[in-house]
Image (spheres, coloured by chain):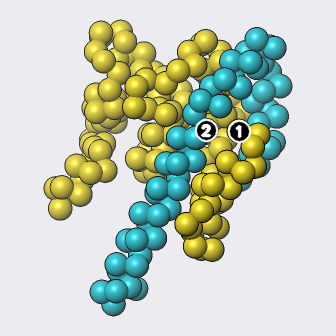
Chain colours: A yellow, B cyan
Amino acid sequence: MGNPDSLLAYLEGLSDDEVMRFKADVHARLPVLFEDCRARAKVCEIGPAPGRASLAVDLMAAHPRLADECQDFVRKMSSITGSPVDWLLTVTYLIELECLRVGRKTNFGYMLRILSEAFPGRKPYTRRNEKERAK
Amino acid sequence: MSNKIISPLTEFRRVTESLSSNERALFRQALIQQLPEFLERIRDQVKQEAQKENRRCEHGKP
């Protein structure tokens, strides 16, 4: 961070179209990363779990439909917190809290199961590669 | 996600202005730690999407 050369390294090997898409994605997801870092600063938990960069970013990347399916919750959380992205963190941290409460490892698969159970009657959340394997 | 378009800079200011100096230091630490993987992950996804599109084009399915 703070070094333009290292940031430019992420653009190497990308076509013009891919660079545009990369910038758009970074632009769209940075606020979520900021929220995640803020939440971690508030709870003094800087280091992510091994093999995981950010729960919020992971969830958003894996499950874009989560956002569509939680619109009421999004609106409520947005009006309470004044932030359009806090809802994802809230869901994520509630899940993590539940994992800790029941003494399970906070692994992504278990979190997805809790998430699926939280929204009964809807298609369960699964990992992207599980979906591809099922096809 | 909400349909609002958020400027990352605006969001950065909003997120950090409510933090104490100690929390800001922790925020910075967390950001520095997560940013490389965050960028790497997006780069990989962009590459994968492009490869999928190329394969679709090769098979004549626009």
Q: Quadrant of residue A75?
A: top right
Most foreground residue, B57 or B62: B57
Residue A1 bears which disc, if any? 1
The answer to whether A24 is drawn above or below residue A50 in the figure is: below
Residue pointed to by mark 2:
B35
Residue B62 image point, x, y percent: 40, 85
Q: Is residue A10 visible?
A: yes
Viewer-side residue, B55 vs B32: B32
The chain ID associated with circle 2 is: B
Q: Is residue A116 left or right of residue A4?
A: left
Marks 2/1 in contact by CB < 8 Å: the verdict is yes
* Residue A87 seen by the camera: no
From the viewer's perspective, is residue A97 above or below residue B51? above
Q: Tag 2's secondary structure?
A: helix
Mark 2 → mark 1, Cα distance in angstroms: 8 Å
How many residues crowd mark 1 within 10 Å: few (<14), some (14–19), many (20+)?
few
**Amino acid, disc 1:** Met
Say which residue appears at 40% left-offset and 25% top-offset.
A50
Q: Chain of mark 1?
A: A
Residue B45, given in percent of the width and then of the height, sits at 46, 57
In the picture as drawn, the residue positioned furthest to the front comes out as: A5
Residue plotted at (44% across, 40% down): A59
Count of marks, rendered view: 2
Residue A31 in the image, given as x and y percentages of width and height: 67, 41
Q: Residue at x 34, y 78 (%)?
A: B55
